[in-house]
Image (spheres, grey):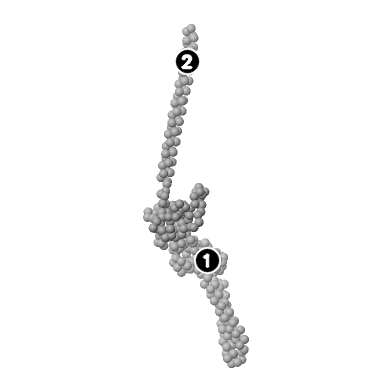
């Protein structure tokens, strides 16, 4: 009987540690679930807080700076002999930009000048002969026609000679240079890209529910990252047609609105720069 009690005590002692371990595991699992729930709740609260902080005011819209460039080219081909400007430089109207090789035009002009001298001399001789009755009227007309043709050829050559040199048609920033000195420039290919300040604008996309309250000439404030004071401008164009700005907002129609600024303010805006736009109704 005593042996039986000892055996039962040993079996109880084997079961008790197992029961204790099971309770410990359950307690640990409960604690783990509680910690996970706590972390998930904290993460959700943080996301809500960030989303609330990221919401933009209803009267502000995202936009970007756009530039309409002026491409300066020569209608004639030639080797780039002189490039008088570089990127980032400010130029004024009439300032030289570049010059192509003029060797062929110089030779052609000298040749036509010599031909014009001869045709004018021949015309003077025929006029004297006609006045004396020796030359016929047809000879005089033919000589005059030759002289006139030489004059037109010289004018054309002078025009070609002038086109080999190009100056700035407007004041502005040299946004880019597309050829290097010594390279061959095809006819009509731009060599210098200018960005006049009056050609700088801001574009924004406004929902259909708000575009009705915006009018041509309305004042606008544009905020740029890193710049304390906003840029003041006015609405210059409202697209009459709606567009889809992105797939996420394709259920909502938006309209493109353009804004312009005075030259001093526009000179501090750069194409591609993201901005925030706030419209001010009259």
Number of dots carrying numbers: 2
Secondary structure at badge 2 equals helix
Residue of label 1? 73
Q: Residue at position x 45%, y 63% from top?
A: 196
**59 displayed left or right of 143:** left
135 left or right, relative to 33 = right
Q: Is residue 169 above or below residue 146?
A: above
Quarter the C terminus occupies: bottom left
Q: Secondary structure at mark 1?
A: strand
Q: Position of residue 41 (x, y in %)?
A: 43, 36
- Residue 99 in view in this figure: yes
Tell me where residue 114 sits by quadrant: bottom right
In the image, farthest residue toward the top: 1
- Between 191 and 225, the one lying in front of the other is 225
Rendering coords of residue 85 (x, y %): 47, 64
Report if residue 266 is visible in the image. Answer: no
Vertical position of residue 151 compared to residue 31: above or below: below
Label 2: which residue? 12
Residue 278 on image: x %, y %: 41, 54
Determine whether, in the image, residue 54 is placed left or right of residue 244.
left
| Pick the front one: 246 or 99 | 246
Mark 2 vs mark 1, CA separation in Å? 101 Å
Q: Can you give x and y, in whole percent of width and height, for residue 23 in the image?
A: 45, 23
Bin the neighbour count of mark 1 within 10 Å (Cα to Cα): few under 14, some 14-19, many 20 and up. many
Residue at image position (45%, 28%) is 30
């Amino acid at each position: 009987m005593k042996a039986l009690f000892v055996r039962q005590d040993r079996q109880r002692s084997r079961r008790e540690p197992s029961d204790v371990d099971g309770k410990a595991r359950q307690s640990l699992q409960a604690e783990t679930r509680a910690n996970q729930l706590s972390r998930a709740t904290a993460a959700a609260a943080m996301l809500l807080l960030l989303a609330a902080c990221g919401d933009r005011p209803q009267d502000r819209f995202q936009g970007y700076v756009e530039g309409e460039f002026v491409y300066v080219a020569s209608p004639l081909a030639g080797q780039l002999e002189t490039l008088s400007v570089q990127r980032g430089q400010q130029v004024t109207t009439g300032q030289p930009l570049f010059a192509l090789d003029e060797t062929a035009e110089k030779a052609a002009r000298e040749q036509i000048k010599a031909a014009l001298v001869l045709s004018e001399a021949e015309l003077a001789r025929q006029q004297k002969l006609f006045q004396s009755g020796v030359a016929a009227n047809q000879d005089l007309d033919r000589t005059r026609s030759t002289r006139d043709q030489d004059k037109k050829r010289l004018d054309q050559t002078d025009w070609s000679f002038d086109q080999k040199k190009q100056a700035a048609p407007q004041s502005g920033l040299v946004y880019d240079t597309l050829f290097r000195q010594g390279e061959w420039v095809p006819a009509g290919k731009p060599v210098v890209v200018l960005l006049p300040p009056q050609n700088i604008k801001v574009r924004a996309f406004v929902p259909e529910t708000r575009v009705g309250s915006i009018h041509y000439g309305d004042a606008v404030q544009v905020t740029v990252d890193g710049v304390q004071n906003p840029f003041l401008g006015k609405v210059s164009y409202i697209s009459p047609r709606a567009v889809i700005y992105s797939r996420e907002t394709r259920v909502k129609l938006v309209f493109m609105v353009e804004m312009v600024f005075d030259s001093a303010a526009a000179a501090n805006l750069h194409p591609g720069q993201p901005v925030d736009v706030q419209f001010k109704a009259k």
